[in-house]
Image: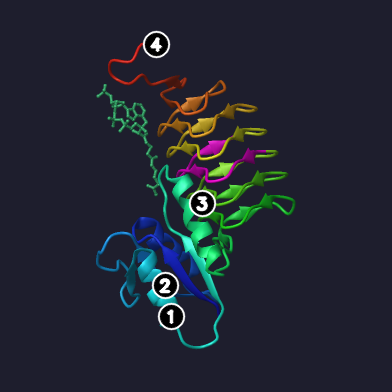
């Protein structure tokens, strides 16, 4: 039975703990940059990289150690950086797929992805590294989703949608067919995106429009 260590001790850690519950993976440690109480009874929390190294040195037994990064929101770049930090210590990064999720036989799923309860990753979809497909989110046929993207709960991508690296699609957003969401863009919860979204901007509403910061000139 592999032992699992998670970086991140917030809601996403609770979700991944539930995902592995009853499986052959056993959560044995949490790491977080903050010195907080462990949110999971009986699972110790270690603080920062130094804490991770203390945890590793204190381990006994021969169980394989695997890692997961429980960092959600729009923090895809942090997620990939923390994955690399685990890899540098020889900790493998499996993909987590909830038992109720659907993944097509020909979907290509990158290292360290998290596909949560009732999510759907459909035919010919490609996911990069460290992608979160949150609860009941779906990516229809031929979707291409870049590294570190997060699709929030219930987000719906129609066919042939592209989401570039580190974009964050909010809860319940809908992306129409063949649209491209640019790198690092943020799609607000509930938005309906009908046209391509440039890199780095935030869009909200139906139809989705770029949200201007106060004082910004259009
Ligand atoms: C399991 C999980 O929970 S995973 C996490 C999932 N998280 C999400 O889905 C969150 C997605 N985030 C959002 O939708 C955010 O509201 C954002 C990114 C669009 C905007 O966030 P902020 O920049 O902090 O905006 P802020 O809350 O200050 O609101 C600014 C204005 O935009 C409006 N607004 C904010 N979000 C939205 C939205 N999704 N749709 C329409 N309008 C919105 C606000 O009402 C406010 O309007 P006002 O100025 O007229 O009062």
Closer to the N terminus: mark 3 or mark 1? 1
Query: Magenta segment range?
Result: 143-157
Q: Is mark 1 within 8 Å of ligand 1?
A: no
Picture disc at residue 80: 3
From the image, state whether disc 4 or disc 2 is nearer to you. 2
Q: Nearer the viewer, residue 129 or 135?
A: 129
- Kindly state the secondary structure of the residue where label 3 is placed: helix
Q: Is 218 left or right of 94, judged from the image as shown?
A: left
Main SS class of the magenta portion in the image = loop
Question: Which residue lies under the disc numbered 1?
Answer: 57
User: Does the residue at mark 4 contact the one at mark 3 (Cβ under 8 Å)?
Assistant: no
Mark 3 or mark 4, which is nearer the start of the sequence? 3
Are circles 4 and 2 on residues that touch, CB within 8 Å? no
The numbered dot on residue 53 is 2
Q: Read off the residue under disc 4.
A: 218
Label 2 to label 3, Cα distance in Å?
A: 19 Å
Left or right placement of residue 1 versus residue 172 in this view: right
Mark 4 or 1: in front is: 1
Furthest-top residue in this view: 218
- What residue is drawn where x is 74% and y is 51%? 106
* Image marks 3 and 1: residues in contact by CB distance under 8 Å: no
Q: Position of residue 34 (x, y in %)?
A: 28, 60
């Amino acid at each position: 039975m592999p032992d699992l260590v998670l970086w991140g001790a917030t809601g996403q850690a609770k979700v991944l703990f539930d995902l592995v519950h009853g499986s052959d993976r056993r959560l044995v440690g949490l790491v977080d940059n903050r010195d907080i109480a462990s949110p999971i009874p009986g699972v110790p929390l270690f603080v920062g990289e130094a804490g991770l190294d203390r945890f590793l040195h204190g381990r006994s037994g021969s169980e394989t150690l695997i890692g997961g990064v429980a960092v959600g929101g729009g923090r895809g770049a942090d997620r990939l950086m923390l994955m690399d930090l685990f890899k540098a210590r020889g900790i493998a990064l499996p993909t987590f797929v909830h038992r109720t999720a659907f993944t097509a036989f020909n979907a290509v799923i990158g290292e360290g992805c998290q596909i949560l309860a009732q999510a759907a990753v459909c035919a010919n979809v490609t996911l990069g590294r460290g992608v979160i497909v949150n609860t009941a989110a779906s990516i229809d046929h031929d979707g291409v989703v870049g590294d570190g993207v997060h699709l929030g709960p219930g987000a719906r991508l129609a066919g042939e949608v592209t989401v570039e690296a580190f974009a964050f699609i909010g809860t319940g957003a809908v992306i129409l067919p063949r649209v491209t969401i640019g790198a690092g863009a943020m799609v607000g919860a509930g938005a309906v995106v009908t046209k391509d979204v440039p890199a780095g901007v935030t869009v909200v509403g139906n139809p989705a429009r770029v949200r201007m910061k106060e004082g910004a000139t259009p």
